[in-house]
Amino acid sequence: MDPKTMTITEAAAALRKSELSSVELTEACLRAAEVGQTITSAYVTIDREGALAGAREADGRRKAGQPLSELDGIPLAVKDNICVAGGRTTAGSGILKDYRAAYDATVVGKLRRSGAVLLGKTNMDEFAMGSSTESSVHGPTRNPWDTAQIPGGSSGGSAVAVAEGSACGALGSDTGGSIRQPAAMCGVVGLKPTYGRVSRYGLIAMASSLDQIGPLTRSVDDAELLLGAIEGRDANDSTSVELRSDWGLKGERLASLKGIRVGVPKEYFGQGMQPEVEASVRQAIERMAGLGAEIKEVSLPHSEYALAVYYVLMPSEVSANLARFDGMRYGTRVSGGSLENTYRRSRGQGFGKEARRRIMIGTYALSSGYYDAYYLQAQKARRLISDDFFRAFRDVDVLVGPTSPLAAWKLGEMQDDPLAMYLADIYTVAVNVAGLPALSLPCGLAAGLPVGFQFIGRHFEEGRLLAVARAFEEAHGRLPLKK
Amino acid sequence: MQLTLEEVDKIAALARLELSAEERESFRRQISSILDYVGKLRQLDTASVEPMTHALELWDPLRPDEVRSCDAATRQRLLEAMPARQGDLLKTDAVFS
């Protein structure tokens, strides 16, 4: 079996049976990552020594019959906005290009304690602001399916690492689609958990009422395994939630989809959708019917406002969260002769264009005289969007539709048209606005590029969401990964 | 909705951002078109809708306000992250001048 395509579940079985060592598996990932740096540039930092040291320790534990968990010895990659103590953590930004994290994010600590091997940090849009992984200070990441295309974003590096075989799985973050959309464009599985399920302590904040950390993997089983390793209440993140026992992950396997009510939001096949993407998603819905699911058309009537809500709330929260980057306690300082001018220069030169654009929009929306018209109105519309989902979930168990209206586009194609790029987030942002869990699963190809099929569930019902997605994946087969 | 260059300068001043001359103009155009787009929210009648401040409104986020210290290695990394320092003190431009 090829370590570049095996799932975490398969790799863990091979480690258990001593058919493979963690050092061999880690070495295969590192080689793929190093070759990849000349082609796709998935990584910002590769920690060869640290990873191999971790792999040797994991092999020792396995040999002694004392593995820490199913993940012991499994090499994983981490998005570069998640802190790993002592290592460079740049969030793709010039203002943090030499920053070394002072502490581990809670999710990183959990991975360490489960024995996972940390390969390095993956590239991303600056501060996770973007849908293409082009706005990183380290340069763009390219799609392994076609290197002229973007890999999606903002967790593009994590999606590419999983797709090209330079990590068995990866962590990303999702504020408006940043796990699901690159997963869709690179042909891998991406899961955004319910808001509050996973601690965000040590995640460099973008929009705090929307951000959530989640896994990118090669299978639904792997997504469940990784989520199980990182979830749970954390005293260091006051928005993380104590998980009830009925919210637990049990690896539920459905013999068929009989009795499962699947809603298809009629608003999710709107204008501007690439015809091949629509055809592929419609075919996936028919396949679900073939597996016994009861397919129902539903309406989320305020869908057309979701993107506008998102593009008011998110930049507002960005403008507040990024106020901490002022060149004083950490990050790049550009002296301006006075405190005020040092702030202005450090921020003006340290932040890239998109970060500054969003800070400006948010500052405007929150400024005196405009607050009610933009921010308050968006918070009210947020409730209407959230209520739409509550109503729909009275009649159905899961919702399905496209992850993105488009397959991967050409590098540079949308760089000077921020609004056009924002419109590509149209089917992912509402999920964050309502705090729901959602997963993107590969369902086919559009002109040779992967298409993502999105499953949306009720709050904290990841178990059911994963079970339905798994039934589809098992019947339909995993999409061949790019070699 | 068309922002003026003066409005762009005012927002940049509030956000403590230095912009280049070229950016003042491109940001003016781009931010105007984004504000136009999000302006569609005004079509919604929200007179009787309560604002939603969080994705989940389930918990009490308050905790006791206690000082917790960190270990020596974390403290050292925090100090090393400072762009300018004197011993263990952070150096800045004069706050009062």
Image (cartoon, coloured by chain):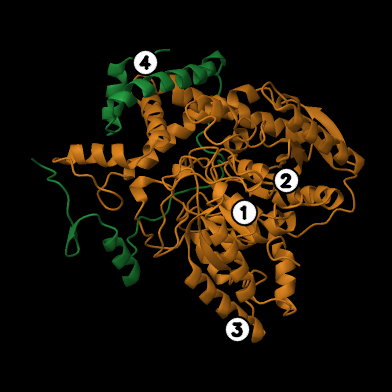
Chain colours: A orange, B green
- Callout 4 secondary element: loop
The circle drawn on residue A231 is none
Q: Nearer the viewer, residue A259 or B13?
A: B13
Q: CA distance from mark 2 to mark 3?
A: 35 Å
Which residue is denoted by mark 1 in the rendering?
A: A215
Which residue is denoted by mark 4 in the rendering?
A: B3
Please tell me which of labels 1 and 3 falls first in the chain: 3
Choose mark 1 or mark 3, whichever is in front.
Answer: 3
The circle drawn on residue A60 is 3
**Do tags 2 and 1 sit on the same chain?**
yes
10 Å crowding of disc 2: few (<14), some (14-19), many (20+): many
Q: CA distance from mark 1 to mark 3?
A: 27 Å
Q: Amino acid at mark 3?
A: Gly
Which residue is denoted by mark 2 in the rendering?
A: A441
> Would residue A212 be seen by someone viewing this image from the given angle?
yes
Q: Nearer the viewer, residue A262 or A9?
A: A9
- Contact between marks 2 and 3 (CB within 8 A): the answer is no
Q: CA distance from mark 2 to mark 1?
A: 12 Å
10 Å crowding of disc 3: few (<14), some (14-19), many (20+): some
